Image (cartoon, rainbow, N blue to C red):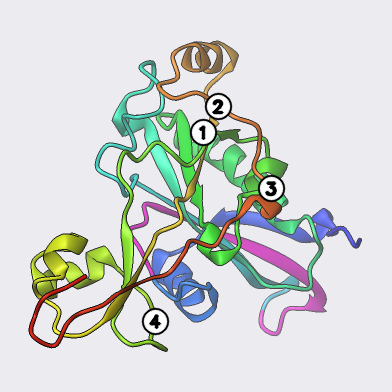
Amino acid sequence: MRYVDTSKLSVREIDRKIAKDLIVKNHYSHQWTKCSVALGLYYKTGKQHSFFDEEEEKLIGTICYGDPIGRHSGASISTAIPRTSVYELVRLYVFDGYGNNIESYLIGESFRWLKNNKKDIKALISYSDPMQGHVGTIYQATNWLYQGNRIRPNDSWLFRFEEDGKFQHGRTIFPYYGTNDIKKMKTLVKKDFWVKKEVRKHRYVYLLGNKSEKRTAVQNLKHPTFPYPKTADIEEPEIVKIKVHKFGTFK
């Protein structure tokens, strides 16, 4: 295992447009999201800069924070932490080849930056997506609190309208059908389709305050914490085919 040489790294705020370009081109989602703070990870190449009397640096990653995407997420951590004092880690990307612990380094440096520059932010929230094979290993390595994957009260469904097509989230199809309820979809779709439950995302929380603030926040958490999940725990949900009779009745 090759560890990164942290003496060659530095982290500082970057323009959100630069972060957006890096994320859209390289992150697995290829999608941007709302972002309040973007930090860049720079690597000293050991070469002389072409124009300046200093060592050349290369942007090799970014970490982005923003207001929590879920309407109630910011208020769901602790009664001791107001909604406005919460950021969500919305995007993280680092190019390969710079060391196995580099993402942990970037997350740790981002904690320090937030403590120094965003003193009103007292907690962070983030999610890992089992559909991408993620259980939050990087959060586990940086000591986040794990709060399971059952906080959201209802299951949501993915829909596929061709046998070899891609599954679409219920939110994506809602504008086209006015619903994503399977029973209602049966009356609207004119041919067989497939559904499967969306694998629930794992939720992680990190507390940024001083020792006293952290202690109070932990004592007043709104949701319990659990042991960290493992990749082996990921289960692929069953795909169910919804058959449509040609005369418009269903089974």
Is the residue marked by circle 2 packed among few (<14), some (14-19), or many (20+) residues within 10 Å?
some
Which residue in the protein does label 2 denote?
Answer: 225
- Which amino acid type is shown beneath numbered disc 4? Lys
Question: Callout 3: helix, strand or loop?
Answer: loop
Which residue in the protein does label 1 denote?
Answer: 147
165 vs 90: above or below: below
Q: CA distance from mark 4 to mark 3?
A: 26 Å
- Discs 4, 1 touching: Cβ within 8 Å: no
- Which amino acid type is shown beneath numbered disc 2? Thr
- Which amino acid type is shown beneath numbered disc 1? Gln
Of callouts 4 and 1, the N-terminal one: 1
Which residue in the protein does label 3 denote?
Answer: 230
Which segment did they paint magenta? 32-51
**Tag in front: 3 or 2:** 3
Which residue in the protein does label 4 denote?
Answer: 166
Q: Which residue is at 44% across, 36% downward?
A: 118
Q: Which residue is at 57% across, 35% downward?
A: 146
Residue 64 location in percent, x, y? 47, 56
